[in-house]
Amino acid sequence: MSSAVSPLAPKTYPEMPTVRGVRMATAAAGIKYKNRTDVLLMVFDEPASVAGVFTRSKCPSAPVDFCRANLPHGVARAVVVNSGNANAFTGVKGKAATELTADSASKAVGCQTNEVYLASTGVIGEPLDATKFAGVLGDMHGSAVGDFWLEAAKAIMTTDTYPKVATRTAEIDGVPVVINGIAKGAGMIAPDMATMLSFVVTDADIAPAALQALLSKGVGPTFNSVTVDSDTSTSDTLLLFATGKAGEDGQKRVEKADDPRLVSFRHALNDLLKDLALQVVRDGEGARKMVAVTVTGAESDSAAKRIALSIANSPLVKTAVAGEDANWGRVVMAVGKSGEMADRDRLAIWFGDIRVAVNGERDPDYSEAATTAVMQQEDISIRADIGLGNGTATVWTCDLTKEYVAINGDYRS
């Protein structure tokens, strides 16, 4: 685990208010790490609505299978998260570990196992000793408190260099509601329906089906638009819970996602998801720079996104950014290989506000010095206009440094 905090880390953390209806506790179960918390328990003393999105990996972890099976019930009473072991590619042992963990949690909390949600992050292929949870969950249930968001975020870190938290407020029926979220992720980040791990809780009263629709739509321009290294995790899990406590203040339950009363909430939720997603990119393993890649003029929005991901995931583009080299030829390469329609002679490219290429050749006013100054910044924007249609998309990534290789070369040791 890298000891230095990413230079792109937030300078301060927001004050995280409590969300009525959820309590949390962490413990050090010694799953992989010494002298740090590695288990998180979230408890809903009354049943909460739940929605979730998960990895599209064809080799999902055992906890992802477990959550998917429980999600149709729509109700949550407990979440158990561990770091240090992903419980992925662990066969029948992995399934047994999830069942043992869920059983321990249901006994501790006093609920059904189909009201328990699980997530694990860490090394793939190592059996998870779930007996380590059995001893701590009962005590954690007793000591869980509401004001614990930053500590919760710390317990789920792996190669992260800082905890990731965000909070927003909104209103439904004129009643104020709170949304809090935590996330973890630094490497193996190219989410496909979810981030590596993220847990979001609101005190709004929203039915599970409406909550699911909000979440499924909200991940598109946020978590599904970030990439650190193009590798989609086996464990990607994003869960959203609604405790319903705002009902005590007069907020009437929302049953449908298209309910006009959700305008403020939807905006706040999407803003929070984007905040967490960008914090994940800014903690990209070894990252020194954040890159926003925008594609305009593509045939469609989906084509624009594929081209943008082709640029953002290119090791040559990312190493050029790391070396502060305005090598726009690499962007040309990435556009050309994306598989989407492009016209070489209509392509224009910008680094920051500086147009470096236009009409299929270098911009006649190109200035190496001015462009290098752009590349020396911590936050860099790259834009490519394809010149064919109205499709646009933005994705976010980071540079690729020697440190990324160092972190991942000895990850299991």
Image: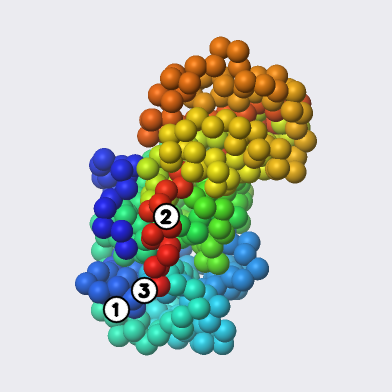
Residue 260 vs 194, above or below: the answer is: above
The quarter holding residue 91 reads bottom right
Q: Which residue is mark 3?
A: 413
Task: Identify the residue shown where x is 43% and y is 34%.
Answer: 324
* Amino acid of disc 1: Gly
Task: Single out the mark in the foreground, 2 or 1.
Answer: 2
Q: Secondary structure at mark 2?
A: helix
Q: Earlier in the sequence, mark 3 or mark 2?
A: 2
Q: Is residue 3 left or right of residue 51?
A: left
Q: Position of residue 32 (x, y in %)?
A: 33, 76
Q: In this rendering, would 256 be left or right of 145?
A: right
Tag 3: residue type? Ser
Around disc 1, counting alpha carbons within 10 Å, would you say few (fewer than 14), some (14 to 19), or many (20 or more)?
A: some
- Which residue is situated farthest in the top direction here? 365
Vertical relation: 193 (above or below) 330: below
Q: Which residue is mark 2?
A: 404
Q: Position of residue 306 (x, y in %)?
A: 67, 43
Quadrant in the rendering for residue 77: bottom left
Can residue 243 be seen in this snapshot?
A: no
Q: Is residue 314 left or right of residue 244?
A: right
* Residue 308 horizontal/vertical position (percent): 62, 39
Q: Quadrant of residue 106?
A: bottom left
Image point 66% across, 38% down: which residue? 333
Give the x, y percent position of residue 118.
Answer: 46, 72
Q: State which quarter of the image contains the C terminus.
A: bottom left
**Label 3 to label 2: alpha-carbon separation:** 15 Å
Residue 408 seen: yes
Q: Earlier in the sequence, mark 1 or mark 3?
A: 1
Question: Which residue is identified by label 1?
Answer: 30
Q: Is residue 84 above or below residue 394?
A: below
